[in-house]
């Protein structure tokens, strides 16, 4: 059974940093991080190809967030630096069951974690 478990969320002041972790089971294709604030649609934040050769970022987080993975530990990370209040959301990790040309689209992912809350205060 496929499982994804996020951790590392919390509250931080603007300009601070957090590192999210997601432990997954089974082989996956792209892995991604998404976020959703109340009343808003879920949006893609970052994604990484199975071997880590390709990474993808939303324009809003480029230069601030870094996605990485440790396949031996079945873990994908999202390092978030220079956090802004606009980054406040529930963050979800996701895994795809096949390839996609659109790695930041929600529809590309089959498996989802339950989320970890990130709150950034001004």
Image (cartoon, grey):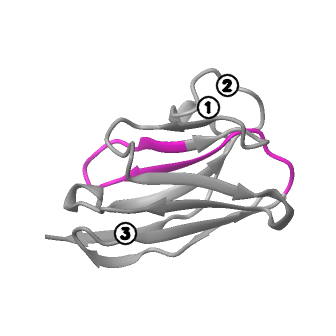
Q: Residue 8 location, x and y as percent?
A: 51, 75
Of labels 2 and 3, earlier in sequence is 2
Q: Nearer the viewer, residue 66 or 2?
A: 66
Residue drawn at point x = 67 percent, y = 25 percent: 100
Q: Residue 60 location, x and y as percent?
A: 31, 41
Judging by the rendered image, the residue that carries numbered circle 2 is 100
Of labels 1 and 3, earlier in sequence is 1
Query: Which of label 1 and label 2 is nearer to you?
Result: 2
Q: Is residue 67 above or below residue 13?
A: above
Which element type, helix, strand or loop, lies under badge 1? helix
Q: Is residue 15 above or below residue 65?
A: below
Of labels 1 and 2, earlier in sequence is 2
Q: Residue 53 location, x and y as percent?
A: 72, 37
Q: Tell me the CA gap for discs 1 and 3.
A: 23 Å
Q: Tell me the CA gap for discs 1 and 2.
A: 6 Å
Judging by the rendered image, the residue that carries numbered circle 1 is 108
Query: Which of label 1 and label 3 is nearer to you?
Result: 3
Q: Residue 116 location, x and y as percent?
A: 48, 69
Q: Is residue 78 above or below residue 119?
A: above
The quadrant in which the N terminus is found is bottom right
| Residue 36 within the segment the image draws in magenta | yes
Judging by the rendered image, the residue that carries numbered circle 3 is 118
Residue drawn at point x = 44 percent, y = 53 percent: 65
Q: Nearer the viewer, residue 91 or 76?
A: 76
Q: Residue furthest front?
A: 63
- Mark 1 and mark 2 residues within 8 Å of each other at the beta carbon: yes
* Part of the protein shown in magenta: 26-46
The quadrant in which the C terminus is found is bottom left
Residue drawn at point x = 29 percent, y = 57 percent: 87
């Amino acid at each position: 059974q496929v499982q994804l478990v996020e951790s590392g969320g919390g509250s931080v002041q603007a300009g601070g940093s957090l590192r999210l972790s997601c432990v997954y089971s089974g082989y996956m294709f792209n892995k991604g991080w998404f976020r959703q604030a109340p009343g808003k649609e879920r949006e893609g934040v970052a994604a990484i190809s199975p071997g880590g050769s390709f990474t993808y970022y939303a324009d809003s987080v480029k230069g601030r967030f870094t996605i990485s993975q440790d396949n031996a530990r079945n873990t994908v990370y999202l390092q978030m630096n220079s956090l802004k209040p606009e980054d406040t959301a529930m963050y979800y990790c996701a895994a795809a069951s096949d390839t996609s040309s659109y790695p930041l689209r929600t529809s590309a992912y089959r498996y989802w974690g339950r989320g970890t809350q990130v709150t950034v205060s001004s």
